[in-house]
Image (cartoon, coloured by chain):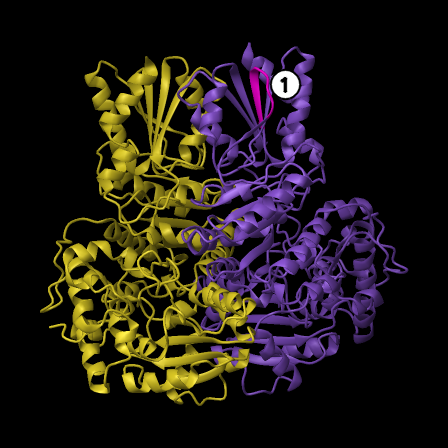
Chain colours: A yellow, B purple
């Protein structure tokens, strides 16, 4: 099945192959990519589209002396297959070992750990300048998709690459798609260039000073080899614009590109998902809320930066939302400033962003939004400790956002509380409000508050004494379990839902002093700079003991979640053990 | 002197003036701008260059119904003079009251508080979309300088503005300068457009889908009025590219544009500075270090993003540094990724950034740098509590950066320690290291450590008991003063220089338990998420009392520093008062 692949231990073996063999190799790579994707899930379309480019790169250049930087890593599988990591695509054990992202710890042919978009050109500029300072001679190549091009960091990188004055080759892989469809004026120019076979006079890359070359069929190994051979060892910053087919070689992925950008494990025969995704979910809840709201209020508008799928906003749903949904493309900074100004202009913006990607907008949250105190709403998805790849951790958002003045960060514990907080946030006009979507669809038949305008008021859910547990958001259930465990030991603790991650309820904390000796804080995220430390600081000069639970300041990588919980002592048993030791 | 200005209470009065009067008004505005600048300092060149544009805008459009967004606020003085804020330019009391930045609390003609670059186009997009959702009709105008254009947020904004599908007018004020000279390929296109009077076929703005118009003399009121009248009420996203002279009307500013971008109070006759800037300073120290280092090691390279003046790197010094200095233009994200890759490629990068602007790079610090653990060095200037404008506060950097894994954040207390830490950071190859430049040039004849590779090791400077003071960076002197004050009360405290802002010395903190009952932390920055809270968390379950000192989570605005210190209880007397109360 992998006849030629088996002979490829590294780039040197690619160079030995005939034209015919290179073409067959492409087919084998596609089979291997699909084998991994259908087994453990991963990026499908981007990898299937870039196969010939990866082959041509390793045929023409001499990696790792020549250095290839893959943007966002969505298209790095074929490169991995050609650089000694075939086990990651063949065996299940290998799939666990080899990640879906570029990683220099895996191979000398990778230079960076990358999972956020739009960074490759800047990184390549750094490698090129380091080369020039040291008087070395080699090629530096960035491979970036058209979807990543709209990100500010990428555009800053292009502008600086254009004036580097020495060798840098940027392969712009234009498959006419971002994760979803592209958005932004820059894509008008890509279309013009495609339509004119790269000949149009009006060319943003030439305008900026690049040498420019176009390859109409980037899925032709021959054409790609020819183009790269012509550019090899150039001393000028160069853009090689190639047109490829996203998902090439797998019919479902070719025909329906958006859901096949990244996919869960699937049945290869028909592309059907192996997982049962039925049942209630947070995305349906949010979408239905938006729909209802829009019927009543034309000022409502949802904003997203190139990842609508995270929120279940597929093409059909986006069409229904119409002008009340704006995908700004990969442009998170723009999205936050845009949302702030929408609120200032009287609209009711709701910006939808995944926890790991809100990191791209600290200054926009601070300057464009918080300083101006505009009532934009931000929904953060997936926030919390996870077994994710190290490039997609979602445990830093509390620490990052909750120390910015004026931002109100809410952590609902149930679906009902989420809906109430969301509606309050949308209808109020005094604060920028961030809401951390619950990770699980828990329900409660207790009444939930509708009004959150008295900031930083914690809710005492159960009254007890000696120990108080402040359990935030998705860790409220853990708080309940700790409480139950303590009760077994004869302590009936107070259980508090703090609701606000961005501040402390001084009155509540003060009142706990009367009958409590220990406060336990639980948060689903990094301890350093997080919610719990604020509580601890409040009690610094008092007799109250405080134990903070959350994740450590570290990048974990595809960790076993239960193992992480044990290491962080995030189980009822371990927490109770610590509590009893502290109370002794 | 201000004959016509006196008749202008708002935009409506501008519309009544004759061509001749408009021209004279320009002269009066220049005089008023200079009157403020020479008295209290401020932005000179950008405001002198934009006078005619501001007049034409208020002549043609109907602010605040039509909405004008000024990028970064460097050119908002003439607009302020035409919108009821002349006191800010005439009387010293008025100059204190009216800020140098756009501010909606000052006037209905401002829409945002802005002091960081490259945000205007995204903000204007939000106002325009809010207008469209609500079925309103008015013009939305962004005014952005060519220097701000290179910022990623601006480029994201342009790309999205181009596809807005309705009225938005972006005035690109091209004065051929950023704060210093421009850097980046995008400026090649601006030059081509200037050279061809806007006629070149290769036009990045047209490429992206904008209508485009060029005004060769943006300092002609007539030409500007004509252009704006032609564009008023357009239903298409439009770029109006204008060419102006930075510093126009004041010879020193016209002739030497970079130092006159922003200036301290000066003598109007010859432009000489009113302040005495002689004496030793941190910038000379850093520059001399770089010079010496470069002689020995060609891999050294200093990087800056468009603000070399903050580090005293004037044109002459930049020339001396040659290829060992890279100004990437306003492109902070690129700067961090670039630095990370320089380190990966074997160079020794030192990125120079002001505290307020490091905020623009949280994700680049986390993903591009920290996750990859490349040994790039970052020097942070001006970090600490200050009386700065609310848009330029420098009190958030500890909280923002020190909770990112892998980053080592050092806070030197003296010039000697700064030099030692800098040299260690440059020579080591294990960690990304940030160093917070000292705010004052304090000296010490005590020997300083050369090696900081054992992370998070605090230095006990004076041994005592009962109370331990952990005084970080620029607050070490405050720590000494607190210690002296305590000694007067019969307590000889332990005084600790923690050196590392990004972690705690568990061994040291543990050892303090034996003879101390109270730990005091002092940090020159925000308490929330900062250094002190980490110490407090360490002691959470122990008997140790902890008091944390720093600034509150708030945006202050041109505050009196001593008043702030009192409010934050950051004086030796107040701290000792708290300490004694806690020990009781």
Give how far across and how far down residue B80 sits, in percent: 71, 57
Give how far across and how far down residue B158 sits, in percent: 51, 69
Q: Residue at x 57, y 17 (%)?
A: B467
Q: Residue at x 74, y 64 (%)?
A: B316
Image quarter for residue B382? top right
Residue A441 lies in the magenta stretch: no
- Classify mark 1: helix, strand or loop: helix
Image quarter for residue A448? top left
Image quarter for residue A395? top left
Image: magenta residue range = B461-470
| Side (left or right) of A381 relative to A31 | right
Main SS of the magenta part reads strand
* Residue that carries the numbered disc 1 in the rendered image: B576
Q: Is residue A576 visible?
A: yes
Eyeballing the image, is A497 above or below A388?
above
Eyeballing the image, is B513 above or below B186?
above
Of B294 and A162, the residue lying toward us? B294
């Amino acid at each position: 099945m992998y006849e030629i692949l088996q002979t490829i231990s590294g780039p040197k073996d690619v160079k030995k192959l005939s034209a015919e063999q290179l073409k067959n190799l492409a087919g084998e790579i596609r089979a291997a990519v699909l084998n991994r994707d259908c087994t453990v899930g991963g990026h499908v379309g981007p990898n299937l589209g870039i196969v010939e480019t990866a082959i041509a790169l390793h045929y023409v250049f001499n990696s790792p002396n020549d250095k290839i930087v893959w943007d966002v890593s969505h298209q790095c599988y074929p490169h991995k297959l050609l650089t000694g990591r075939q086990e990651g695509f063949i065996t299940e054990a290998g799939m666990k070992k080899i990640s879906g992202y570029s990683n220099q710890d895996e191979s000398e042919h990778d230079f960076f750990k990358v999972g956020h978009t739009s960074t490759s050109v800047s990184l390549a500029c750094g490698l090129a300048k380091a080369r020039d300072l040291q008087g070395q001679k080699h090629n530096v190549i960035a491979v970036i998709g058209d979807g990543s091009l709209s990100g500010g960091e990428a555009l800053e990188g292009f502008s600086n690459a254009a004036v580097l004055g020495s060798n840098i080759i940027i392969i712009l892989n234009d498959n006419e798609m971002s994760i979803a469809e592209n958005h932004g004026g820059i894509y008008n120019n890509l279309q013009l260039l495609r339509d004119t076979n790269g000949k149009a006079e009006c060319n943003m890359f030439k305008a900026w000073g690049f040498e420019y070359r176009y390859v109409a069929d980037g899925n032709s190994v021959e054409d790609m080899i020819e183009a790269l051979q012509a550019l090899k060892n150039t001393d000028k910053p160069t853009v090689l614009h190639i047109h490829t087919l996203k998902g090439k070689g797998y019919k479902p992925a070719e025909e329906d590109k958006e859901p096949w950008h990244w996919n869960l494990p699937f049945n290869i025969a028909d592309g059907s998902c192996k997982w049962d995704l039925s049942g209630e979910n947070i995305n349906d809840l949010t979408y239905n809320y938006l729909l209802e709201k829009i019927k009543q209020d034309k000022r409502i508008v949802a904003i997203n930066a190139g990842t609508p799928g995270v929120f279940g906003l597929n093409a059909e749903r986006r069409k229904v939302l119409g002008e009340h949904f704006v995908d700004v493309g990969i442009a998170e900074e723009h999205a936050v400033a845009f949302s702030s100004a929408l609120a200032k202009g009287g609209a009711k913006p709701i910006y939808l962003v995944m926890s790991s990607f809100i990191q791209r907008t600290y200054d926009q949250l601070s300057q464009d939004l918080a300083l101006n105190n505009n009532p934009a709403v931000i929904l953060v998805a997936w926030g919390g400790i996870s077994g994710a790849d190290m490039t997609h951790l979602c445990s830093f958002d509390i620490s990052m956002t909750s120390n910015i003045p004026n931002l109100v960060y809410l952590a609902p514990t149930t679906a009902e509380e989420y809906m109430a907080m969301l509606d309050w946030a949308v209808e109020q006009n005094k604060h920028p409000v961030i809401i951390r979507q619950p990770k699980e669809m828990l329900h409660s038949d207790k009444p939930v508050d509708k009004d959150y305008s008295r900031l930083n008021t914690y809710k005492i859910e159960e009254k007890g004494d000696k120990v108080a547990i402040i359990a935030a958001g998705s860790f409220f259930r853990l708080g309940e379990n700790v409480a139950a465990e303590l009760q077994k030991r004869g302590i009936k603790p107070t259980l508090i839902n703090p609701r606000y991650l961005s501040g402390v309820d001084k009155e509540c904390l003060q009142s706990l002093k009367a009958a409590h000796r220990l406060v336990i804080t639980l948060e689903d995220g990094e301890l350093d700079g997080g919610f719990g430390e604020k509580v601890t600081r409040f009690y610094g000069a008092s007799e109250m003991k405080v134990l903070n639970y959350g994740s450590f300041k570290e990048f974990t990588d595809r960790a076993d979640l239960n193992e992480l919980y044990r290491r962080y002592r995030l189980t009822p048993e371990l927490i109770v053990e610590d509590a009893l030791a502290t109370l002794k």
